[in-house]
Image (cartoon, rainbow, N blue to C red):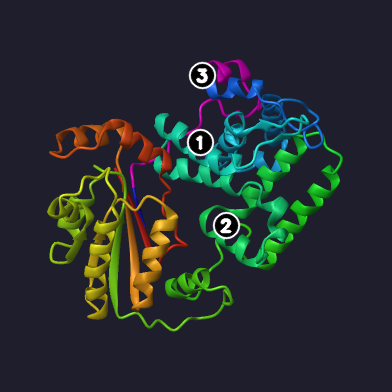
Amino acid sequence: MISAVNSLSWFFPDCPNEPDWLINWPALEAKFDWLLALADCPQDPRYHAEGNVLIHTKLVCEALVALPQWRVLPSKERSHLFAAALLHDVAKPASTQVDETGAISSKGHVLQGVRMAQQILWDLGVPFREREAIASLIKYGSLPLWFWDKPNPERAVIKASQIIRCDMLGLLAEADVRGRYCDDQAQLFERIEFFREFCQENHCFEQPRIFPSAHSRFIYFQKEDRHPDYEAYDDTRFQVVMMSGLPGSGKDTWIQENLPNWRVISLDELRKRMGIDPDEDQGAVVNAAKAIAKEYLRNQQCFVWNATNLSRQLRGVLVRLFANYQASVRIVYLEASWEELLRRNGDRTANVPEKVLSRMKSRLEVPDITEAQTVDWVVQ
């Protein structure tokens, strides 16, 4: 469930439109410093003989806009794809290295680029749903080229389909390949066509793969040996609600308004009781929280785990703990505008330094539907 501001009228700035479909590069370069920075970033000529990253980005965008399949999409989907093409290599300047032999690499630029794109779009005031769709296109944009190299290709494409449409991933990958000069271009196009056929065979090309139930979906992504059509027996006995969101996003208020009678394990409250500052080692706080949680879990008592829970890895550890006790897990993610977060943070008795809050924002990984039986996004 998404509760958010209306984003029906949102459209990415300077996304080309009919009848001429022209990209206004001078306007884009004047607006976005990060775009101009791409011109100073070299690429390995074996894979990108076209030149620097800005040249590649322009070629990718031009190729995307020329695709008939892109032009017939609704304006919002066209806008998502154009923004993703424009931002898909935004982290290359920060991640590119040239070794002593002159070899050029940009390891990790995709995941770093996802976070940079999220911050850029957040600062532009892009609505939550649109921001996350664009970020997901960037995150999974290379999947059509490499999905068959994954340990479980079926699982890889089905997971992606839960988060972003695979037909759009195919379009972005095709534009990416058309926007580069390389010897293996024909082979890359074959991979994309194989990806499209594979997604169609797995019923997840233009829509998410449908599971028999939310619990079956959860089990599929928790265990490697499950078939997507397998209807898992729901043996859950109670529910645990895991909060997620930056400080000041409204987690305490949401709990008071929606689950006023539930037991709450608050890491903030435990820190206060134990006299441990947020910037000190949190091991003792987390261990105390888990000890309380295990008592509730053993007794099959519903409760709320109230903490920021900003990373997927941290959430995954907790979700597995709760699920081992036959709990159904609901993640509730809350988000407010940066200005509102700063205002609320300033009003708190024990506020978080703005630099720390900004660093937390840059590391945020928004929960997705593959992490739990239920995920709610409450965005102000």
Q: Position of residue 87 (x, y in %)?
A: 57, 33
Q: Is residue 237 left or right of residue 362?
A: left
The residue beneath circle 3 is 31
- Can residue 370 be seen here? The reply is yes
Secondary structure beneath dot 3 equals: helix
Q: Is residue 248 left or right of residue 206?
A: left
In terms of depth relative to the viewer, which is nearer, 33 or 94?
94
The residue beneath circle 1 is 117
Secondary structure beneath dot 2 equals: helix
Residue 208 magenta-highlighted:
no
Majority SS type along the magenta span: loop
Residue 18 magenta-highlighted:
yes
Residue type marked 2 = Ala
Would you place residue 22 above or below residue 83 in this image? above
Q: Which residues are magenta?
A: 4-30
Q: Quadrant of residue 318?
A: bottom left
Residue type marked 1 = Ala
The residue beneath circle 2 is 160
